[in-house]
Each structure stands twice: as structure tokens, then as C-alpha cells.
Amino acid sequence: MDTSLQRTKPRTPSPRRALSDRGTANLLLLPTVLLLVAMNVFPLVWSLYLSFCSYTDTSHLTAKWLGTANYDKLLGDPDIWKNFIVTAQFTLLSVGAQLLVGFGMALLLNRTFRAKGIITTLILLPMMLSPVVVGMFWKFLLDANWGLVNWLLQSVFHVQDRAHPMLWLSDPHNAMWSLVLVDTWMWSPFVMLISLAGLNAVPPHLYEAAEVDRASAWFKFRYITLPMVSPLVMIALLFRTIDCFKIFDLVYVLTGGGPGDATKTVSFSLYQKAFDQHNTGYSCALAYMILLIIIGLANLFIKYLAKVRGEGIPDATTLSQTLAERTQHLPLLGWLCASPARLLVLLLLGAFWRQIPGVLASVLGHWQIVLGIALAAVAIRVMMQLPTIVRNWLAYGAIAVATVAYLLPIYMIVATSFKPATQIFSMPPKFVPTHIAVDREKPSTGYDFGLTLKNYDALLYKRVGNRPDAPVERYADFPMQVGNSLFIGGLSTFLAVALGTMAAYAFARFNIKGKGDLLFFILSTRMLPAIAVVIPIYLMFQSLHLLDTRIGLVILYTVFNLSFSTYLLKGFFDDIPHEYDDAALLDGYSRLRTFWKISLPQALTGIATTAVFCFITAWNEFAFAQVLSGSPPLTAPPSIIGHTGSGGTEWGQIAAGAVIFLIPAALFTFVMRKHLLRGVTFGAIKK
């Protein structure tokens, strides 16, 4: 008897054992939703209640209901409005500078030349670093007396008087510019990466048609390049606007909000009121004001993400779309709600109308920005008229200068970690290692220095009497903190990717009721400012005795990365043809077995990419670890600033810790460079 037909007969799973599509979707999706609700919705509802109360987290007294008193006090507090103005100034200046620098770099790199891939990857390094590392070492580079920046201005470019050095961080007028400079150095590569993807995606036949019509280079740039690239640039600007508005780490480390209140952003002010002054009820009210603004910006961001993904039905049905549908028949209100930008502008004007004159005066006072934009526009227009060979050589020169500007601070971190204490502050700065340093070696008069490992030794070991030549007493705190960072980052990454993989498959393969709303909720949790949501999380962890524990940070980092992993992995599962699943189901596979045997192996590259992104995020995280850890801190990022105090700043040890901390970020940037773009845009841009 021929049994070939029996061998190929589809296997039908038992009705009792096989889950329905709805049951499978719930099984895969519910753990993610429940965890996000427990760690986001419940604490936020709790803090909303406390925002109407008088309450202090250090007191054992119950919260006393005040009604709207905290909000009334908040709206009438001139210091808070000043903090909002400082935040708006920083956001405007920083995002504007990043747009100019990032888009300009993309235009320069949008040509074929040798080592293009290596140079592009090297320029991307700053955005993968921890803000703590960046802030601490730029504080060293911007020092008025022995900082590298002032030395370059005085001795190389001769634009500064040695007797009157620039006070970058101690002068109220310069501190904001210093903050903008550092943030631009760190994040303009992000704008460059997205802009470069947009430039590469412009169809070549458009330029060919323009060439046939003998269009000028400026015409092609104005009417082809800009319109085609603008949607992706808008993604970058919205993302950076959200990040700049909720900035905390860089302000905390670089300027401390000073001098005076010159750089005190609203997030830094919230931290002081919540954890220095312990005014919990009032700080919860301020946190909700920040959250409302961030949610409005996040709504715009999610709308453009769906638009750039090019899907017929967007992944997320945003609040603005719902408002537009409900109010489209109302004359004035319908016109306002039809555009999220109009509605956001109206809300901001309503909230900050008393501060509009001051904001306008401040913006007009920064005439340098307006002049810089005008000069950049003129320079681009002039360059467009030059012959192609001249433009290319000018571009190569600009690329070389930019590469040095991005890499020189990183090189100085590495070099300082190997310098003896006597040569760290010597002038001129020491750039080139030429020999092994000896004890008490005097600095040379040139640019060379001797190599030493004493900074790493002091960071890793605790010696008797803190003398460098004494026997080792025990390991220092830093190795344990690095180990904690590896453990917390590794375990939280595993949990976030595992839960995110299941939820992403459910979103990609099943028709889930309210899928758009769920996706909006999941992605919006990632947009929330850490310092605003850390207050209710701190109170919850305090009640659950999870403060200063590894398991507490593991849970928190898992939740923090879960929204990112879900949204990014959904894009990878969307790329896998549905026909693979359909064929497996016809062959008798259950949904769960299809997921495990068919879809999961196909998505392994995306899962690995997502895991690396999640690990680097957890590895670099500072705000939660700073607030929820004790002394000494549990993880490595807060410990880096622990080498500053009344006894002075141990810059050699800080540099050594920074180098150890840089290694995973540098390796990740080189190994995963092909997937960087997809990761930093939540999967909206795939190549």
C-alpha cells in the first residue's frame, strides 16, 4: 500500500489543545500590557492624586488633600516659568544647531569616496555614549584655565586673549551656549544619520530629469532634495525636540543648573524640588505639567512615524486624528484640530501667554543664531554655483575637519586615562604617548606624555592608606558597579526582548481590537521624561522596599526598554512574509508552534539588533540609577561623578572609568552599524 499520501497529509491539531487566534494573541500580548500598566499607569494615577495633596516622601504622615492649591501655586511661581523659558531656549538653540550641523554633514557625506563607511561610523560614536561620560569630560575640556577648548582658541586659532580666557561654565551668558555645544556635538550625528538616509532614498531619475532640463544645482536642492528629505528630517527634529525638552543628565553633570538659574531646565528643577527639597505633592503637579507637553509632542512624533512607515493603516491612531474626526464639522474648532501643530501651538500660547514677550526678547537677543543661519544659507547657495570638482574638494576638507571635531574629545578621554596626575593639567596639552612614565615624572614642554596604568589601578583596587605603592587591600567599588551594570543590563534586556518579541508578533500577525490605541500607549511610555515619572516610581519602590536593589532596577529597565523592543520588533516581523505562517498553519502547525518554529528563526537578526540597543540603553542609564540607588550607587554611570568632591576631581580616574564604559558602546556602533538607523528611528527607516 502506498503511504506517501499519508505522510504528506496535513496534521490537524486537537481542538482541546490548540488555542484560538484570540487566545494566542492574548497569551502573547497580556504580559507586556499588564507590566506596562502596573509600572506606568498605576504610579501615574497615584502621583496625580498626590499632586492635589500636601505630602512629603520623608514623612510618615498621610497625604493631606489641598485641591488645586499646588497647581495654583505652580502657575503663579515666577521661578517655574523662568525654568520653562530656559528649557525653551535650550530646545530652540540646540535643535536648531543640530539641524544645521547634522543636515550639513549629511550633504557632505552624500557622495562616493574611499573610507566613507568608516568615517560615517566614527562620527556616529558620540551619540552612543552615556550623557554622564559626555558631560563629565566636556566639563574638563571647557575648563577656563587648562581646558583644551580655550587652548585651541588661544594658541591655534588666536581668537582669544590668554589674560582673559572664556569662562564657559561659570559665566551665565556662556553656560547656555556650552550646554548647547555639548548637546549638539553628541546628537547632531543622529540628525546626520536620518538625513543621510533620506538623501540616499531620493530616486536618481529625478535628478536625471532635472539635468535634461539644465536645472542648476540650487534648483535641484531646493525643489527635489529638500521636499524628498523633509519628512525624515521632521522625524529627527521631533525626536530631538522631545529629548531636549526633558533633558536632565547633561544639565546635572555639566552645569548643575547654574551659574545661578542660567541653565536650570524644568526637569532639573523638578529633581531639586522632589529629591532635594522633598516637596513631593508640589513636584508631582510640576511633573504632570511636563507630561502634558511631552504627550503632545509624542503625539506628533507617532503621527509622523506612521506616515514615514508608509502604511495604509497607521500603526497608531493618534489622539490628534481622533480629535480631527470628531470636530471636522465644527467651523473654528475643526480647523484647529485638523492640524496637530495648530492645536499644540494654541495650547502652548494659552499656557505661556504671560511669558511670550520675555521669550521673544530672549530669542531676538540671540542674534548670533539668526546670523549663523543666514550665513549658512548664503554659503550653501554659493557652493551650489561652484564646479563639481571644487565642491567635492571643499566637501572632503570639511569632512576631515568635522571628523577631527567629533573624535578629538573622545581621544582626549582615552589619552587622559593613561596620563600621570602631573601631566593631566599641564600646558600645552599632551597628545602623543612616547614612553612609559616613571614616578613623579615632570611634564615635558612639548605635546608628548608618558603612559601609566595608575589611574586604572586606583579605579579597580583599594590600597592600604590609599597610597599607590601600598599593597592591595581589596577591590574598589567600581568593579562591582560595572558587574551590577552588566547583570542588570543583561537580565533586563533578556526580559524586555522576550516579552517584546511575543507582543510584537501578536501585533504583526493578529487583528487586535484597539491595536492602534495599544501601540500608541506602548510607544508613548518610552517618550515620558525619566525624571518626571521617577517620582511615583520612587514612592512605589519605597513602599515595596525595592529602593537600592538590583531587582528593582531590573524591573524598571525592563519596562523602560519593553516599549522600544515591542515597536522595533514589530517592524521586523512585518518584514517576514505572511505566506510562511499560512503555509505552516495549512501543514497543521498551531499558532504558537508557527511562532516558535517559523517566525522566530526568521526574526533572529532583528531580535539581536533590538537586544543590543536595549542593553546599551540600560548600560548608559543614569537618572533612575541616581535616584533609586543608595551610596555608593549600584551601577557604573552614577559612580563616574562620584570621583568629584571637596578633595578635588580625580580626572584621571574619571577618564579611566569613562574608557571602560566606552568599550561596549564603541563595539556596538561598529558591529551593528548597518542596523543603527532602524534602531534609532523605532523601525520607521529600515535602510
Image: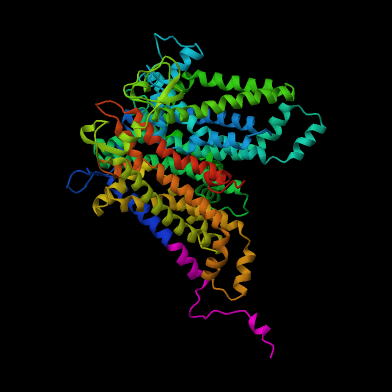
Q: Is residue 368 above or below residue 219?
A: above
Viewer-proximal residue among 191 and 655: 655
Q: Is residue 276 above or below residue 599?
A: above
Please say whether residue 16 is one of the residues in the magenta stretch: yes
Viewer-proximal residue among 186 and 171: 186
Residue 248 visible in the current orientation: no
Please say whether residue 493 is one of the residues in the magenta stretch: no
Residue 546 visible in the current orientation: yes
Q: Residue at x 68, y 22 (%)?
A: 383
Q: Residue at x 49, y 42 (%)?
A: 667
Residue 580 in the image, given as x and y percentages of width and height: 62, 66
The answer to which image quadrant residue 281 occupies is top left
Q: Residue at x 45, y 59 (%)?
A: 498
Viewer-proximal residue among 156 and 74: 156
Q: Residue at x 31, y 53 (%)?
A: 551
First to last magenta residue range? 1-30
Residue 490 in the image, given as x and y percentages of width and height: 40, 52
Viewer-proximal residue among 403 and 92: 403
Residue 138 in the image, given as x and y percentages of width and height: 41, 27
Q: How many marks?
A: 0
Q: How is the image coloured?
A: rainbow
Q: Is residue 378 left or right of residue 418?
A: right
Residue 37 in the image, given as x and y percentages of width and height: 38, 56
Q: In which quadrant is the N terminus drawn?
A: bottom right
Looking at the image, the residue that sits furthest to the bottom is 1
Looking at the image, the residue that sits furthest to the left is 60
Q: Is residue 256 above or below residue 129?
A: above
